[in-house]
Image (cartoon, rainbow, N blue to C red):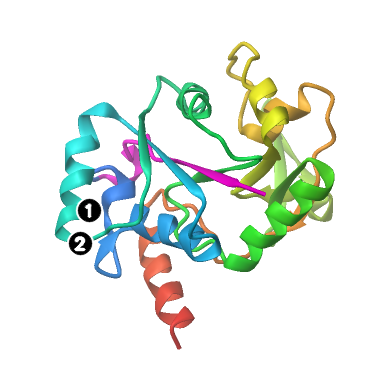
Amino acid sequence: MKHTIIITAGGIGKRMGSEIPKQFLLLAGKPVLMHAIERFYQFDNHAQIILTLPNEWKDYWEECCYNADFDISHEIIDGGKERFHSIQNALQIAHGELIAVHDGVRPLVSISTIEKCFHTAKAKGNAIPVVEVKESLRKLENHSSTALVRSEYRLVQTPQCFTADILKKAYKQTYHSAITDDASLVEAMGIQIHLIDGNDGNIKITTPVDLQLAEILMRTEKL
């Protein structure tokens, strides 16, 4: 089946404390975003790769690609006001039978995780990777807090994979602030979401500490 990969890279990285958006910060000598694209190219070098970018950063990205001799084929779509609108824009040109949506600041997703997502989505209509919660959780209630049973919860990662008909139908819904990811949008249509095991290294880079951890994880991968 034909695969489409939508990689969202519309963030401005306020928590990173950098003038350059986090997706363009260097990791192992090249922008974080390039590593994310390379993972999916390694999985399927014939997949359609769509990148959503803020219009004002397109020239910067193209310069990065030129300087790094980065030649993996991809299409660039204008990012919207919210992530929801960016993906809506990308779906207009998506032609794969299975579509994955991935955060551009998750450069260390494993090929195994990608494979499991697509395999399950092909069989069941959708799949999202999750990992167990390793720390204790407490729920804040007014001026107090309550302990939660962490085994009942999972942390959600990307890529989130769906058949094209399901995802395109989901994105015809009206945007509202309660939409946190693609799975929640699909779930709002009454469709059960299927979970697969993600990989612990598939971290989302949002702070300087995350970037430092990603450097360590990348060096470990090469050992």
Number of residues whose C-alpha sits closer than 10 Å to that of mark 2, classed few (under 14), some (14–19) or many (20 or more) = few
Q: What amino acid is at disc 2?
A: Ala
Q: Position of residue 40 (x, y in %)?
A: 50, 58
| 86 vs 174: above or below | below
Residue 163 lies in quadrant: top right
Q: Position of residue 79 (x, y in %)?
A: 38, 27
- What span is in magenta? 1-17
Q: Distance between the residues labelled 2 and 1?
A: 5 Å
Question: Disc 1 marks which amino acid?
Answer: Cys
Residue at 38% x, 51% y is 207
Would residue 185 be found to the left or right of residue 47 on screen?
A: right
Q: Can residue 153 be seen in this view?
A: no
**Relative height, residue 55 to residue 221 (above, below):** above
Give residue 68's mark. Answer: 2
- Whether residue 128 sits left or right of residue 202 in the image: it is right
- The residue most toward the bottom is 223
User: Which residue corresponds to mark 1?
Assistant: 65
Q: Nearer the viewer, residue 132 or 192?
A: 192
User: Was residue 75 drawn as part of the magenta stretch in this picture?
Assistant: no
User: Is 56 on the left-hand or right-hand side of 12?
Assistant: left
Residue 15 belongs to the span the image colors magenta: yes
**Residue closest to the eye, 65 or 33:** 65
Q: Count the marks: how many? A: 2
Q: What residue is drawn where x is 61% and y is 30%?
A: 180
Q: Residue at x 50, y 55 (%)?
A: 46
Question: Given contact means CB atoms under 8 Å apart, are the residues at marks 2 and 1 in contact?
Answer: yes
SS type, badge 2:
loop
Front-lying residue, 71 or 116: 71
- Residue 39 placement, left or right of 197: left
Residue at (33, 48) in percent of width and height: 23
